[in-house]
Image (cartoon, rainbow, N blue to C red):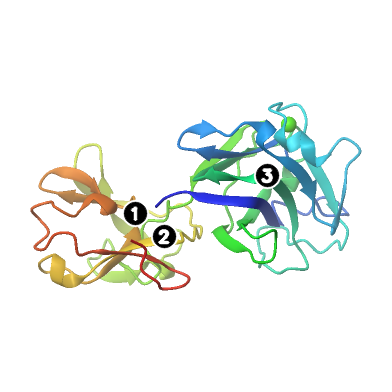
Amino acid sequence: MSSWTANYIRFYVTGIKGTSESSAKTQVAEFQLLSGSSVIATSSFSTSTSNNSTEFPDGASANANDGNLSTKWGTVINSGSITNNNSGSITSTNAVFLQFYSSSGVTFDQYQFYTANDVTDRDPTYWQIQASADGGATWTVLDSVNNYPTTDTRQTLVGPFNLNSVCLIGTSDILMADLTFKQIKDINRGDLVMSDIQTNKTIKVARVLKSFSNTAIILVHIPKNLISNIDDIYCSEKHVFWINGSRIYAKNIKGVGFVEKSNTYIIFNSKTKEPIM
Ligand SMILES: [Ca+2]
């Protein structure tokens, strides 16, 4: 399972890039949902904006869904309290959202957006992707991104973001350059880590240049009794393992000789802790 079907989808902006404007504003030229590598047709949705905002005269929500980078969804946050300057936290009162609606439901597994034509300080840098399949009664957070280094280049693609793209959970151990271990949630910018260079299968010391949180819903649990000399691993379906000289997605590990038992790893929902079969 790697896609989501929902009637309502929200691009829920919780933080913007800068503080230069007296009223907090946010904007994007386009926001797109994808299935595989294909952008879902704009005719699949209607659009709207949260109540906590006032669209610019040239910032109607439909402009985020018209396939035209010259038009934009742009809105003033009425509370004036949207988090800016990349120091934010997510609350229900200081965020605004762009909402998509489809009566028949839309199935998607990735999303992306394009920066608007002007004012880089309005660019989203903190956001969630939320979805509802029951008319808005309950919402599921499919992705939560903090302090993303959104480009300053105008009318430019940001993403795509795969909804299962997180590699490892926060308590996973990372091998540092001094050969000690540090949990991934404790890694800071500037830290030196041992990095796997996938193009030539070598390892070298690399410096961490940026970090952000990306919360996947679907995780794979590979119990430690499946692989010799390794502890339990919790990762996304598409976390890559080197197995017998090949790159293998976690979700495809079963049946490979490296695994001592076949067909016994567990895919589970990280929110409900329930197995997904
Ligand atoms: Ca547009």
Neighbour class for label 1 at 10 Å: few (<14), some, many (≥20)?
many
**Residue 26, can we see it?**
no
Seen in the picture, residue 5 relative to 235 is either above or below; the reply is above
**Residue 52, can we see it?**
yes
Q: CA distance from mark 3 to mark 1?
A: 28 Å
Q: Is mark 1 within 8 Å of ligand 1?
A: no
Give the secondary structure at mark 1. loop
Give the secondary structure at mark 2. strand
Badge 1 is on which residue? 237
* Front: mark 3 or 2: 3
For the point 41% across and 60% down, which residue is it? Answer: 218
Q: Can you name the residue that lies furthest to the right here?
A: 57
Residue contact at pointers 1 and 2, CB within 8 angstroms: yes
Q: Which image quadrant for residue 102? A: top right
Q: CA distance from mark 3 to mark 2?
A: 24 Å
Q: Between disc 1 and disc 2, whose residue precedes?
A: 2
Does residue 69 appear left or right of residue 144 in this picture?
Answer: right
Disc number for residue 218: 2
Does residue 152 appear left or right of residue 203 in this picture?
Answer: right
Neighbour class for label 3 at 10 Å: few (<14), some, many (≥20)?
some
For the point 51% across and 31% down, which residue is it? Answer: 38
Does residue 213 appear left or right of residue 131 in this picture?
Answer: left
Q: Between disc 3 and disc 1, whose residue precedes?
A: 3
For the point 52% across and 44% down, which residue is it? Answer: 108
Disc number for residue 102: 3
Give the secondary structure at mark 3. strand
Q: Between disc 3 and disc 2, whose residue precedes?
A: 3
Q: CA distance from mark 1 to mark 2?
A: 7 Å
Q: Nearer the viewer, residue 88 or 260?
A: 260
Q: Position of residue 36 (x, y in %)?
A: 45, 37
Q: Position of residue 82 (x, y in %)?
A: 77, 61
Disc number for residue 180: none
